[in-house]
Image: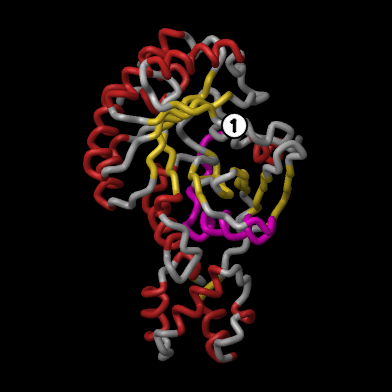
Amino acid sequence: MKTDIKSMLPAEIGAALAEMGEPEYRAKQIFSWLAKGAVSFDEMSNLSKALRGKLDERYFITTPKPVCKQVSEIDGTIKYLWELRDGNAVETVIMRYKHGNTVCISSQVGCRQGCAFCASTIGGLVRDLEPSEMLDEVLFSQINSGIPISNIVLMGIGEPLDNFDNVIRFLELVNHPDGMNIGMRHISLSTCGLTEKFDKLADLNLQLTLSISLHAPDDETRSKIMPANRGRGVEELLDACRLYADRTGRRISFEYAMIDGVNDTVKHAELLAKEAKSVSAHVNLIPLNHVEERPFRPSTPENLKKFVSVLEKEGVNVTVRRKLGSDVDASCGQLRRKLVSGK
């Protein structure tokens, strides 16, 4: 069985080289080649042919295949469907902003969290992504598009904290100075609220942005649309957010999908304002992208405007996410669902 070399850090590659009787300094060269998108050891021209042969006997290099690429004619948003080594597929999106280009990556094939408005969770969880596969989403999206990536959001298919160890290893790889060298402060990790993992994440003090997919400020509403809330509850989530912010010194962000008639009333806004202020959170309102298999619709412009007005009146720092990729399969999971269903 060959080993996934792209999921290894330089020190680990160096130790493996030493066992092979090769100089450890070669590890930096190999790691650099991988970070540039090398798809075979033969491309690593500054390594001897003998070493390249040894590496090929022991290791494989992950290389995703672009099954589908959709480019928005409206705003230039690019959506990829990547086929993995085992035939599974995940989605990645490149979004262009004035402050830089952001890639939204998946952390799992499918998702077990069951959010009622999301396409990603239809069909449940298939498997976790390996660190190398998440790195490939960033790397090959950049290579294929020719667009330099400056920011990463883990907000695609899957729940990052449900794949904790692999996600942390991915962050180490993408942040490494000899690799893509994307700073932690340019990375945002989104979670539906697996509070049992917050302490473990805080212990690492990675200085990334923790984004909470809140989507409702009360247990009654949130439990209906987000099964992850059951057994935890909004108050437990808020307590975990306070502790995380206190320990890391990093501001929490609340992601809030505006769903018509579900979570977009003035009463919801007033409660959300109270909770956001209690943890000094920034609120990012997201116009819902409609999913064919789901009954939910985006809030009306009038309700969105009222909602924003309430938050601003209460002194909450609030933004409305610009709706990107409206002419492509913008919602996470939609493109993969089409592949799986054959439509």
Q: Magenta stretch: dominant SS? A: helix
Towards the viewer: 223 or 275: 275
Expressed as whole percent of the image width and height from the top left, the position of residue 57 reads 54, 80
Instruction: Decide: is 267 above or below 94.
Output: above
Expressed as whole percent of the image width and height from the top left, the position of residue 289 reads 62, 26
Task: Based on the picture, tell me whether residue 48 belongs to the magenta stretch.
Answer: no
Task: Please report the residue visible at 50 percent of the width from the left and 80 percent of the height from the top.
Answer: 29
Task: Please report the residue visible at 63 percent of the width from the left and 81 percent of the height from the top.
Answer: 42
First to last magenta residue range? 123-147
Residue 4 in view (yes/no):
no
Instruction: Decide: is 34 above or below 91.
Output: below
Three-letter amino acid code of the residue under disc 1: Arg
Expressed as whole percent of the image width and height from the top left, the position of residue 90 reads 60, 46
Q: Please give the residue where the numbered disc 1 appears in the rendered image.
A: 322
Task: Based on the picture, tell me whether residue 130 belongs to the magenta stretch.
Answer: yes
Callout 1 crowding tier (Cα within 10 Å): few <14, some 14–19, many ≥20: few
Position of residue 289 in the picture relative to residue 176 (left or right): right
Towards the viewer: 53 or 70: 70
